[in-house]
Image (cartoon, rainbow, N blue to C red):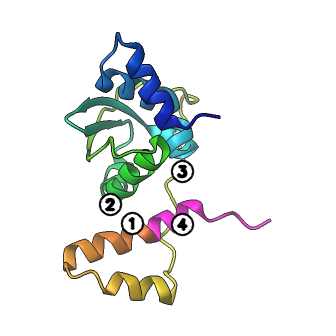
Amino acid sequence: MKSIKEVILYLLALGGRSKKELLQGLLKSLWKEIVGDKLSQISQPTTLEDGCLTIELSDADWLPILREMKVLIRERINNYLQGAYITGVNLRLNPHLSLSRPKGRKPPLPPEPEELSPQMKEIIEKIPDRELRSIFSQSARRYLALTKKPPS
């Protein structure tokens, strides 16, 4: 089985489309698989310029949350694509964004951030930049809350 990176390189070798066009198409078609069901219900990748991906959101409530998660989103995309294709993420609100979800139903907002483990707190405290430390801490807490499995 070929890796995503090998498939990307193969498709580029076939010609006809630029790397940018290919990546945009891949991101749009694999968006739900890359970011998960909740985020795919309120967002979609739109353009890719010089490594910077623009993501449109249909729900203003999610904008501040995703601002905190931009680095995590970029890393998740690059990990999925198995390469450093995305260097930045821009977010843009588009209330007219047409996404495939039932009308009148908004996806629930993510739960309140989880408490970090002592080991994670220790790692975060070593980040020298105070603002970056705060962003990373908040993003890690939100990520843990989003990935937490509901009690059975």
Per the image, label 1 sits on a secondary structure element best described as helix
* Residues at circles 4 and 3 in contact by the CB criterion of under 8 Å: no
- Asked if the magenta segment contains residue 149, the reply would be yes
Tell which tag, 4 or 3, sits nearer the viewer.
4
Q: Is residue 106 visible?
A: no
- Extreme-top residue of the structure: 16
Residue wearing tag 4? 145
Report the residue marked by disc 1.
Answer: 139
Residue at (31% x, 56% y) in the render: 64
- The residue that mark 2 highlights is 68
- Real-space CA distance between mark 3 and mark 1, rounded to the nearest whole angstrom: 18 Å
Left or right: 112 as drawn, with respect to 126: right
Question: The residue under label 2 is which amino acid type?
Answer: Glu
Secondary structure under badge 4? Answer: helix
Separation of marks 4 and 2 at Cα, in angstroms: 14 Å
N-terminal label among 4 and 1:
1
Neighbours of disc 4 within 10 Å: few (<14), some (14-19), many (20+): some
Q: Nearer the viewer, mark 3 or mark 1?
A: 1
Distance CA(mark 4)–CA(mark 1): 10 Å
In percent of width and height, residue 102 lies at 58, 29
Give the quarter of the figure containing the N terminus. top right
